Amino acid sequence: MNKIKIFLIIIFSLFFTSCWNYRELDQVSTAAGVAFDYDENKNKYILTVEIVTITNYGQGQSLILPEYFSEEGDTIFDAVRNLISKTGKKIFWSHAKVVFINKKLAKRGILPILDWIERDAEVRPDMKIVFVNSKMAKDVFTTTNNLQKIVSFHVYDILESSKNIAKYPNINLWQVINEIQSDSAATILPVAHIIEEKGRNIVKISGCALFKDAKLLGFLDDHNTKNLLFIKNQIKGGIIPIKNALSTGTDISFEIYNSQAKITPIVDDKVKFKIDISVDVSLAENSGEFDFIKEENLIKLKDFSEKYIAQDIENTLSIIQSYNADIVNFGRFLKIKYPTYWKKNKDNWNKIFQTVSYSVNVKLNIFGTATTSKIIRVGK
C-alpha cells in the first residue's frame, strides 16, 4: 500500500507541478503599476502602465529601470489589450503593486476598475489602490526619487510604512471591494500628492479620499485620517503630538505601540455608538522645561491627553457625518447587535446615520519615557 501511495504521488507531481499560465519571460512585459484616467471628450479610458525593464551589464551586474506606455480604450480591458500595439507583448500583471486613479475617474466611479481586477486571473487582489491628487493619475510617473527608480514600488513601500506614521490608510484592493459591497457601501483610499522639492517632483502620501457607492465624495486631511484609523482599529504605530500641553508651554509627543478600538452600538430613543479606545504609548518627547516625566505631572498629562484625544476624535466623527458616508461601517456593528432593528431600518440607514451620536473614551497606557528619564534644561 505504501508503495502504491508513493507511486501516485510521483505521478501527480509530474503532471500537476507546472503552472497552467506559464509563459517565457521574453513573451511578456512585467507591470509594476498602472494609472487609470478618463477622457470625457472621447468617452474613453486612458491606461498608463509602468513596465519593469532589466538591463544586464555582464559580470552579474544589472540595472532595473521603468518604461511607460499609454493607450486608450472603450473599456478597461479594451485599453489593456490595446497596449500590445505598443509593447509588442501582453502585460504580465501578477507582480503589479499599485493602481492609481485620478479625480475625473473617481467621480465617475471606480466600479469598472474593481470589476476588471476581480475578473482578471493575473491581477492580484492584494494590490494597493491610490487616489492621485493631480490632473492626471499618470502624473505620478513623472515623480523621481533616489531610493527606488520604479515609482510603483516606491509608493508601495510608502504605503507599507503607514504603521510608522498613521496619517494615511494602507488598503488592499480586496478590502476596497469588500467595503464597497458592504451595507455602508463606503470606503477610503490613500491620497498621493505630487509636490515640487529642490527642483524635482516627488510623491507624498497624506490623508484619505472618501468614497460612497464607488464614487468620490470628499477628503480628510492627515490629522483627521489618523483619528479615523483609530476608530477603524487600524493604528499600530505613529506619533500623537500635543502642543502646549496643560498650557505649560511644553510640547510633548507620545509614540504609539498598539491601539485597540471597541465600538458598541446603543439603540434607545435614537442610535448611539460608544467608542472605547485603548492606546499603548511611551512619552517620546518632552520639548520644553516643564517636567512631565515626574510621576505627579505624568498623571495629569495622562488625564489631559485622554480627554484631548477623545474630543479630537469626536470632531473628526462630526466631519465624517457631514459627508453622510459611513466609512467606519457603523451599520455593521448595529446589524450584529440589533439584527431586528437593522432589518427594519437598513433602507433608511443613510438618513439615520446623520442623526446618530457618539461618546468616545480614550485610555492611554503609558509605558516608559523613551531612552531617558530626564529633561533638558537651559543653563542647568
Image (cartoon, rainbow, N blue to C red):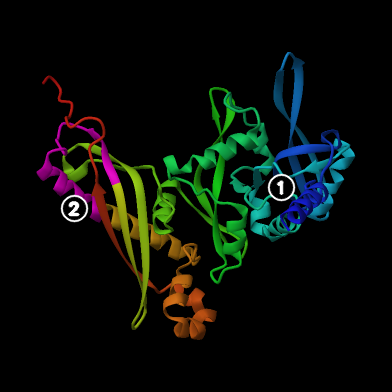
Q: Amino acid at mark 1?
A: Phe
Q: How many marks?
A: 2
Q: Residue at x 62, y 62 (%)?
A: 214
Q: Is residue 331 left or right of residue 121?
A: left
Which residue is nearer to you in this view: 164 or 210?
164
Q: Which residues are magenta?
A: 281-307
Residue 303: assigned label:
2
Which residue is nearer to you in this view: 71 or 17?
17
Answer with the quarter of the image where residue 363 lies: bottom left
Which structural element holds mark 2? Answer: helix
Compared with 303, 203 (above or below) is: above
Compared with 159, 195 (above or below) is: above
Which residue is nearer to you in this view: 230 or 95?
95
Answer with the quarter of the image where residue 217 lies: bottom right
Which of the two labelled residues, at mark 1 and mark 2, occupies the earlier sequence position? 1
Q: Amino acid at mark 2?
A: Asp
Instruction: Name the image quarter holding the C terminus.
Output: top left
Which residue is nearer to you in this view: 88 or 228?
88
- Residue 76 percent coordinates (x, y): 78, 53
Q: In the rendered structure, does residue 124 fall within the stretch colored magenta?
A: no
Residue 36: assigned label:
1
- Discs 1, 2 touching: Cβ within 8 Å: no
